Amino acid sequence: MADMQPVRAASGGASENIKHIAGWIGVTAVGVAALFAAARPEVCVDSKDCAAIFEGGIKRVNRFASVSLIVGAIIQFMTTVILFVKTRGMVGIVKDIEYTFVPPLLMCIALLMLLAENLLLFRGAFVHVAAAGVGETSRPIYSPIILEWVVNVPILLILSGYSALNRPLAEVSRPLVVTNIYIILAWSAYFVPNEPLRWFVIAVAFLMYAWASYDMANWIFVFRATARQEIPSRNLRCVLTILLIVVFFIYGLVYLAGILGILSPREELIFYVTWNIGTKLFFLIAFVGIRASQFYDLLVTLVKLK
């Protein structure tokens, strides 16, 4: 049997993986519901000052982004369907080829979530008002971005840890859950009126980022210690996890700049929209390269067998 994915860590059966995924969804849903109920944020359209700031934002950018994402999602969906149709007959013949279906399918979901985020922002839905003392007065908080993150960030972690570095889902679980929790905590800090308590919540969120980043860095060390040297795109697989650690840190700096009023709501929103799309596009391109190198490696293996 030819080998498509030469290093696949033992990740348990399908039932175990489903338990992990259900656990992630459950923890995230409970966290969002609990903190939303505790914060009870005011809707932006109910505040004249907030609505005025939001209307002066970047609706045109959201509209253009939405159109581009519709096209991108259609192309990615068609690519995924073609890949599945062309390779499903090789399941059972080429070892672990079914794992090559996971990244394009997850990228379809990520692009759809980005589209939903931009459509919500364009319509002004689910935008809230920050507590007094957060940036400028009546600062709009773009909650659709947070909703997109708690879905797409786990997707990126699965792609980098499970699909690229071949770590089992059990190993991906802790940094994934910790990351979603600190995202939700950072969002809730916008609505904390007490300044010392607000900065305590922010500090906890950054400590949790450091914890999750440590676990993610360990993925790389274990992968490089166990993966064979000739595995396709060996270095690129590691770059994806390093990229996420760096990008999440930059997001944190932008978040702090917004909290402190250094960046205007418009500038902060432009950064989030462009980097959200750019990060996913980089992952999309990277996995096209990884998949191409895998098929090339498979072809070379089959030729040698003859």
Image (cartoon, grey):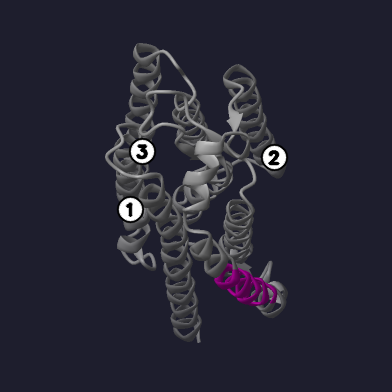
Q: Which residues are drawn in magenta?
A: 67-81
Where does the N terminus fall, quadrant-wise? bottom right
Residue at numbered disc 1: 243
Which residue is label 3 attached to?
255
Q: Residues within 10 Å of mark 3 (few under 14, many from 20)?
A: some
What x and y, as percent, mark residue 47? 57, 34
Residue type, label 3: Tyr
Q: Which residue is mark 2?
A: 18
Vertical placement of 239 versus 63: above or below?
Answer: above
At mark 3, the secondary structure is: helix
Answer whether residue 232 is visible to the viewer in this image: yes
Q: Secondary structure at mark 2?
A: helix
Mark 1 neighbour density, 10 Å: few (under 14) some (14–19) many (20 or more): some
What amino acid type is highlighted by mark number 1? Leu
Front residue of 235/1: it is: 235
Which amino acid does the dot numbered 2 rest on? Answer: Ile
Camera-side residue: 106 or 17?
106
Element at badge 1? helix
Within 10 Å of disc 2 (Cα), the crowding (few <14, some 14-19, many 20+) is few
